[in-house]
Amino acid sequence: MGRQPCCDKIGLKKGPWTAEEDKKLINFILTNGQCCWRAVPKLAGLLRCGKSCRLRWTNYLRPDLKRGLLSEYEEQMVIELHAQLGNRWSKIASHLPGRTDNEIKNHWNTHIKKKLKKMGIDPITHRPISTANDKSQQEQEQKQKQIPSLTDSDTTPDFDQNKEPETSLEYSSSITEAREEGGKSMTSTCDPMELMNNSFCTDEVPLMEPHEILVACADSSLSSSSSSSSSSSSNSSNFLQDLQFPDFEWPCDYMSNSMGLWDYDLSRWDLLINDNGDKKQIVDPSLHCPIMVLDQESWAYI
DNA sequence: AAGGTTCTCAACCGCGGAGAA
DNA sequence: GTTCTCCGCGGTTGAGAACCT
């Protein structure tokens, strides 16, 4: 059966997204939620295919995304999960809240692979790099091991503490270290090991409706890692930074009204910006009142 | 400073699975 | 059972950034 193209490609735009397109997509999804992606570009007034819109949203615009490099702890999690699951990036990503499969895949290919090779570990088999003679034998062994292990435990890899993963070798000590380190730097509710033990999987997290999107209150201690996010070549990078949900300091009355940034009509991005010493305010011109106050640190994002 | 090379990562492509008709 | 549509996944690409000579 021949496959039809995912969309009518004539007249559709490709390549980097512009700030304007991002606005349209965000505004549409916040208004309507995530529905049929095929219909999104038409309804949102975008000259993109639905697939491109979905990708842009899930990999870049989603408000629950963490930005910035993977922490040492996350990296070790990826290695361990990769040893269990192979190149199933979406499964791996499901164990790392706020991370996308694309991000993890890129990080694996650009950083972790090299790191493992440097350590003398084959990034594919997670075994010590050995001579050619051993290789074919090991490949066969690997195949035999992988087939049964992947069939039943896709979403709940076997991290039985009594049983060391077969593929976990030299780096196991560094994993332990990283876990200890991670325990310090991460809150208990974000501990991936704990999440896994509870069979948590972001696959199971229901889609957010616009009104359900919440922005965490300020905790400046957490902002440093996200601020190290890499620069984007896209000309929408500045706009993205607006959307990174920096650690806002929400005015009390604003919070008590149970309103969020996303309750505002985001098609009106022409909100005024007042410079008020240490704090900067985003002012709704129609209401003539500040809707958001950013402290100096948060302001660095904009 | 300039040119070349390498690195990074957002975005694209094509395929397979799931479900509806 | 077959066909079609949509979604999501994994591999790959290419533009821009960063680094090196």
Image (tube, coloured by chain):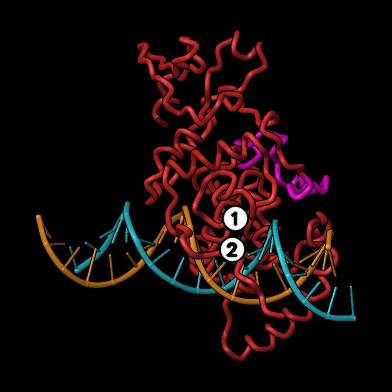
Chain colours: A red, B orange, C cyan
Mark 2 secondary-structure assignment? loop
The part of the image, by quadrant, that contains residue A160 is: bottom right
The numbered disc on residue A50 is 1
Say whether residue A10 is left or right of residue A272: right
Q: Residue at x 41, y 17 (%)?
A: A280
Check if mark 1's residue and mark 2's residue have beta carbons within 8 Å.
yes
Give the chain letter at badge 1: A
Q: Residue at x 82, y 61 (%)?
A: A163
Query: Which of the two labelled residues, at mark 1 and mark 2, occupies the earlier sequence position?
Result: 2
Mark 1 secondary-structure assignment? helix
The numbered disc on residue A184 is none
**SS assignment for the magenta stretch, majority:** helix
Say whether residue A33 is left or right of residue A68: right
**Image position of A78 with respect to B16: above or below:** above
Specify the amino acid type for callout 1. Gly
Is A228 in the magenta? Answer: no
Residue A281 drawn at (x, y percent): 43, 16
Give the quarter of the figure containing the C terminus of chain A.
Answer: top left
Range drawn in magenta = A182-204
Specify the amino acid type for callout 2. Cys
List the residue tagged with mark 2.
Answer: A7
Give the quarter of the figure containing the N terminus of chain A.
Answer: bottom right
**Image position of A140 with respect to A267: above or below:** below
